[in-house]
Image (tube, helix red, strand yellow):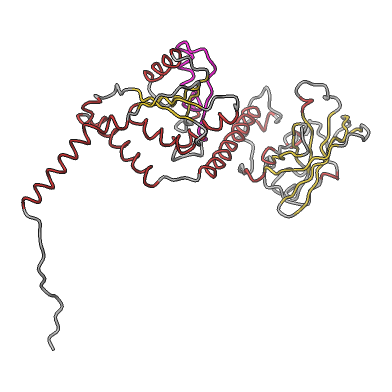
Amino acid sequence: MKIKFVKTEKCKKPTVWAYLALLFMVVIAGYYWLTHVYRFLTIKEEVPAKTMVIEGWVRDYVLDEAMQYYKSHHFEHMIVTGMPVTFRRLYANYDNTAELAEAYLKGHGFEDTIYKAVVPSGVIIDRTFNTAIATKLLFEQNPGWEKNLLIYSEGVHARRTKRMFDLVFDKNYRLGIIAAKEKVFDEAHFWRTSKGFRTVSNEFVAWIWTRLFFHPDVEKEEQRFKNLAYIDIVIREREAKDREFADTATSPLEKEDLKTFKGIPWYPVDPDWRIPAKVVVDTSGPVFEMATNTSRKPKYRKYAILSFKVADTVCTLTAFQNMEHIHHPEYGKYLFVPFRDKTNGKTTYAAGRYLDIYIPESDSILLDFNRAYNPYCAYAHRWSCPLVPFENDLPVHIFAGEKKYK
């Protein structure tokens, strides 16, 4: 028996005419794409609306056009979307492109209120999609607004922008869009410049990708957006506190410590440490003098019991009202919640930490342990600080908020 490792088979190959026909079709398709793609991407769908949305990254001439369109069509609300400034942020005058666009519009005579829909700094990809989420959240915060909006975009980015907004906004909303004409390159012959060809090609490919592969869970993405926006807020608060501590006029630190101060140590911001608590208000108790580390005895009263769970452990904290500040226009809005937990003396200040909460308007509240802070006594002995009552000793670890300074 003869063993063969290869065999011969007949096959058909394209002829020269077939290759020419294929080349002809490619040329026709390419020509059609070159002559139609720009008009396809730069859509214009006007709707009657009272709210205009401008993409904050657009060029100055687009902002000028949008402002004139806003005035001539008698809009009532202006929303500017924006991306956070992440490149050399410490040296920038603005935190995001929405603030920059707002400054430009105000500097050129725009007088109405400008609402900003800003993407959190934790959003690295799908930013246009997230600007749509930010815009929708603004509408939810303003339920009296008419649910029609007109988006003002720039050039070939418009169709993808419309696609992202359509994904986020439900059928109760009516969306329109206007694409400002390009002035950076010749729209009729965009392929003649590197800038024009790259811009149009990139947007066309990006739009196809969103149609074929981008099908996000909008509800899940909205929750992620809210968590990232919350993290940004807390981080900014912490940065502001660092600046306060570094300033000799406002710092609680001793002078010798100021020389080496490099910032307050914190646990990373974790949205899961915002814990819902049940509130039972009881102000029937007497006013008492709260113990401090000095002879000072500030007057407080018990205001409410806060009940919550950490993992499976049931915990309670007493919230106190400062009687000396009860009529203060600002401080009178808050309750004082000092507490100790299992991290004290290890990763956090041994004597305990504090929370300030708004006086609850219902029978529930969100306790935000990311905002737990040290008393000034953690930084210098000259301060007088309330001691944590025994009833506010928690049997759990609170891995959130401010850590011990030294």
Query: As drawn, which residue projects farthest toward the right?
Result: 286
Quick check: 23 above or below 234? below
Instruction: Tell me if residue 296 can be seen.
Output: no
* Residue occupying image coordinates x 50% and y 20%: 50
Residue 256 in the image: state x and y as whole percent.
67, 31
Instruction: Tell me if residue 294 can be seen.
Output: yes
Q: Quadrant of the N terminus?
A: bottom left
Depth check: 167 or 372 in front?
Answer: 167
Q: Quadrant of the C terminus?
A: top right
Q: Where on the picture, by quarter, is residue 362?
A: top right
Number of numbered discs present?
A: 0
Depth check: 314 or 265 in front?
Answer: 314
* Residue occupying image coordinates x 25% and y 25%: 187
Depth check: 382 or 198 in front?
Answer: 198
Q: Where on the picture, by quarter, is residue 353?
A: top right
Q: Where on the picture, by quarter, is residue 153?
A: top left
Quick check: 15 above or below 383? below
* Residue occupying image coordinates x 72% and y 35%: 379
Query: As drawn, which residue projects farthest toward the top?
Result: 109
Residue 58 in the image: state x and y as whole percent.
39, 25
* Residue 385 colored in magenta in the image: no
* Residue 98 colored in magenta in the image: yes
Residue 237 in the image: state x and y as whole percent.
63, 31
Quick check: 185 above or below 170? above
Instruction: State left or right for residue 161 relative to residue 12.
Output: right
Residue 355 in the image: state x and y as whole percent.
74, 37
Query: As drawn, which residue projects farthest toward the left?
Result: 16
The residue segment tinted magenta is 91-120
